[in-house]
Amino acid sequence: MITHDGVFAEHFKVNNANANLVHMPEGVSVEDALMTVDMMSTGFYAAENANIQFGDTVVVFGIGPVGLIAVAAARLRGAGRIFAVGTRPNCVKLAREYGATDIISYKDGDTVKQILDANGGQVDRAIIAIHDVECMNQAL
């Protein structure tokens, strides 16, 4: 692995730039482009690592930017049912638009119990898109 310090500097050397960089399309802001390489790629990578198969039942813990992209990626990979765990109304709305079939609120009691009750048992895959040790335990 090759690492360099200073990736937030004004200039930065990118190894193998021809394989690691693309031109930004017209009309895409720097802010939106940064979301793509950070949030979007992380959410898609999570769904890929989860090895979601057609028809799987998936739970995504946390529906901030990365979790929302993970919901969309799970849907694109063919998940049949997607539980999204979160409470912020704007994120809940987007999670549904991106493919979540069920919303689980941690404010309504034990998250795992809610999922198990709604699904009639365990889910096939879990994605943790929140920095919380308890979510790791819940996913397991």
Image (cartoon, rainbow, N blue to C red):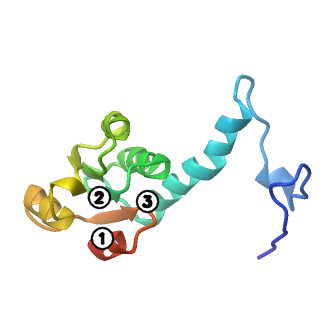
Discs 1, 2 touching: Cβ within 8 Å: yes
Q: Quadrant of the N terminus?
A: bottom right
Return the mark for residue 129: 3
**Residue 89 percent location from the top left of the image:** 31, 37
Of the residues under marks 1 and 2, which one precedes in the sequence? 2
In this picture, residue 108 sits left or right of residue 33: left
> Which residue is under mark 2?
59
Residue positioned most to the top? 27
Discs 3, 1 touching: Cβ within 8 Å: no
Q: Residue at x 26, y 57 (%)?
A: 56
Of the residues under marks 3 and 1, which one precedes in the sequence? 3
Q: Residue at x 34, y 69 (%)?
A: 135
Return the mark for residue 139: 1
Q: Indicate the secondary structure of the residue bearing disc 2.
A: strand
In this picture, residue 38 sits left or right of residue 6: left
Label 1 amino acid? Ala
Q: Quadrant of the C terminus?
A: bottom left
